[in-house]
Amino acid sequence: MDVNTELFLGDNRYELTRIADASVDLIVTSPPYADQRKETYGGVSPDTYVAWFLPISQELLRVLKPTGTFILNIKERVVNGERSTYVMELIIEMRKQGWLWTEEFIWHKKNCYPGKWPNRFRDAWERLLQFNKTKQFSMYQESVMVPMGGWAKNRLQNLSETDKIRDTSKAGSGFGKNISNWIGRDMAYPTNVLHLATECGNKNHSAAFPEELPAWFIKLFTKEYDTVMDPFMGSGTTIYAANKLKRNSIGIEIVSDYFYAVKKEITVEPEYEIAINQ
């Protein structure tokens, strides 16, 4: 069974209207940040960012399945010496739209180079906000488990009497604080901090993220032949990751150079069925 890839060239505020209701299992995207990449995307100021993004997020809410997930890669910027609040304002307004803000992941950029400002240090992380339509969304946690290593053995050396008898957690966290439950296990569930290197200048794009980033969320929230969408496709990282993991995919990109570069790269793989809309 071949996977299907659909690529749309144009403004996603229009192109999204061509996508059927409740047809997408996972949306992973990184839109232009406030007032960034002006030469490429025209720039959106922090003061107008929320109003600009809300019509897009409304369409994303429509096309996402009730069991689906939306992962939004975004970060604040500094304006006149202080942090802008536009990301927090966006979260609040999206909740009013009907989104549930269910989780927040942090992308730690392992290879972030240093910088110097008079009142702060360089950011080495970005947000990955998780939104859902309902509390009952698809999630495959076992697909992203990590090696246990020596953590459990070391932890047991200082295990308190309380930990030895506490078996369940009020938060519903499975093994609770009884660390002895982890003995004999080779794998553990990861944290919500992802340690990945950046790929600056990758694929002739000024803001390409590493393929491992969307791939991790694709494995966590979808199964084979589910549909993954990136409405700000850029260099196509999400689309490539989806194809490699045997997921159907939809990409939308307004910059023609990026669009045709992805189209050229995707079409060299004969096992993919391509529907190009331009």
Image: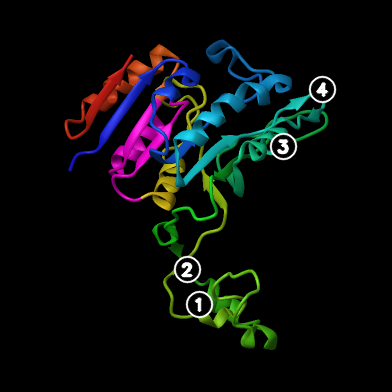
Q: Is residue 93 visible?
A: yes
Q: Is residue 238 magenta?
A: yes
The secondary element bearing badge 4 is classed as: loop
Q: Tell me the residue that label 1 is attached to.
A: 182
Location of residue 66 in the rendering, given as x and y in whole percent from the top left corner: 47, 46
Whether label 3 touches label 2, CB < 8 Å: no
Disc 3 versus disc 4: nearer the observer: 3
User: In x, y percent, where is residue 209?
Assistant: 48, 33
CA neighbours of label 3 inside 10 A, class few (<14), some (14 to 19), many (20+): few
Q: Position of residue 160 (x, y in %)?
A: 68, 84
Labels 2 and 1 touching (C-beta < 8 A): yes
Closer to viewer: mark 2 or mark 1? 1
The span from disc 4 to disc 1 (Cα, nearest Å) is 49 Å
In this rendering, the answer to whether 257 lies above or below 104 is above
113 relative to 276 in the view: left or right: right
Q: Which mark is residue 148?
A: 2
- Alpha carbons under labels 3 and 2: distance apart: 35 Å
* Image-quadrant location for residue 56: top right
